[in-house]
Amino acid sequence: MSPLVRGLICVAIGAIIWFIPAPAGVGPQAWGLLAVFIATIAGFILQPMPIGAIAIIACALLPVLGIMKAGEALAGFSNTTIWLIVSAFMFAEGFIKTGLGKRISYMLLSKFGSSTLRVAYVMSAADFIIAPFTPSNTARGGGIIYPIVRSVTAAVGADAETGKNKKTGAFLMFSAYAAVITSACIFLTGASNNVLCNTLAQEMFGTSIGWGEWFMACIIPGLILTIATPYILYKLINPEIQDSPETMALAKKELGEMGAMSIKEKILCVIFIAALIMWATGSIHHIDSAFVALLGLSAMLLTKILDWSDITKQHGAWDVLVWMGVLVNMAAYLSKFGLMKWFAGVMAAQFAGMPWMTMLIILCLVYTFAHYVLASNSAHIMALFAAFATILVAAGAPVLGVLILLGALCNSASFLTHYGCGVTPIFFGANFMGQGQWWKIGFIITMLHIVVWMGVGLPVMKIIGML
């Protein structure tokens, strides 16, 4: 399908909604905004052009069509949580530019990488350390983790083309990919879509969650998944090689070539730890998480870890700023214009009499497996979060519990396909697994995540007062 046809489909979707009479209880502003919003979501999914461009067009249409005033249409760019994401992208650049991310990984591998199963756990540990400061799975997984695990597969003689030790390569690749996705669940700043969920919850329900609170709710189920996943993959894939002393030798060689830790790496370590402490203690000092991240970015600029050209080159960060600012703002005004309240009332009537916990389980399953038709976690959140969260909160489910569960399961759903999120094609592209095997194992790991998030995550949230 050509970009022109995809674009016309998006326009047609918006036009159809625009000209359908608004239901009783929904004002013309709300209905018009819904038409633009749905057309924008369709554009994000079909992508007739880059999503940042689609967002700009949508933003321009809002005042032109008389839906919102100019200042209202641009209000989303003042959202602090969006700036948290932008700043965290810069942290990721610092990890890559200084080599600190690779050094951490190779240090762990040089000490603990004596077997393929241990290598899987080491890569999980490395990703866990780096994840709080790299909200892009593509930047963290593709820029740091993938090159390292690719070197490891070569060191143990795994070759996708010849088929030699192919199962070993498949195990190492999928377990490293699983580490990236699991870490994204654990930290609020581990994936940009987590912050998108948080921002939408704030705009829709007036409730959001801090970095430390998210971590408290997710660390126990997250650690269970971090420990269980490599072992289950080891049993499912059954790699030919169990002992891998070559990995330790490779890591020591790479560390030797990197030389002593540079002054910039040491400075970044201090900034990294200080920001982590400030995020975790936000309830004490009351400094917004976004400004903690901006302070960290300022420190990196002052110490020349990054220069301004590094900042301007971060196209992914500025792209996120544009499309997230526009989309979150539209979602906020859908709520302000009363559409979400109307929708909640309609849906609550359909589920009347059903306990909210039962509803939560059913809708979470639908929400997760809907990812088969989506190729982006952010698109998943934009398409489904507002509707599902509105239904559940109207039924009596606590906002924070809904926020965390829908946020985590969006990440978990990335396992389902070989196009699950931005980083998935990178690991799949190593060609150690075919599509059928990837989908089969991905389904099993997704089910594991669902069981753990509902069986352990919900009780944990109950204990700490979020349910």
Image (tube, rainbow, N blue to C red):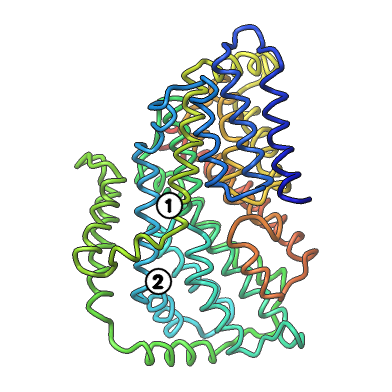
Identify whether 425 is placed above or below 456: below
**Residue at which label 2 appears:** 96
Seen as rendered, the residue at the extreme top is 24
Q: Which is nearer the eye, 64 or 88?
A: 64
Q: Which is nearer the eye, 360 or 14?
A: 14
Amino acid carrying label 1: it is: Trp
463 left or right of 62 in image: left
Residue 136: percent from left, percent from top: 48, 57
Query: What numbered label is drawn on residue 133?
Result: none
Q: Residues within 10 Å of mark 1 (few under 14, many from 20)?
A: some
Element marked by disc 1: helix
Residue 204: percent from left, percent from top: 47, 26
Nearest to the eye among marks 1 and 2: give it: 1
Element marked by disc 2: helix
Q: To which quarter of the image does residue 289 belong?
A: top left
Q: Residues within 10 Å of mark 2 (few under 14, many from 20)?
A: some
Mark 1 vs 2: CB contact within 8 A: no
For the point 49% across and 27% down, which residue is it? Answer: 398
280 left or right of 31 in image: left
Residue 215: percent from left, percent from top: 40, 48
Identify whether 201 is placed above or below 19: below
Residue 112: percent from left, percent from top: 46, 81
Q: Earlier in the sequence, mark 1 or mark 2?
A: 2
CA distance separating discs 1 and 2: 18 Å
For the point 63% across and 16% down, which residue is it? Answer: 348
**Residue at which label 1 appears:** 318
Identify whether 160 is placed above or below 288: below
For the point 43% across and 81% down, which residue is it? Answer: 106
Q: To which quarter of the image does residue 9 belong?
A: top right
Amino acid carrying label 2: it is: Ile
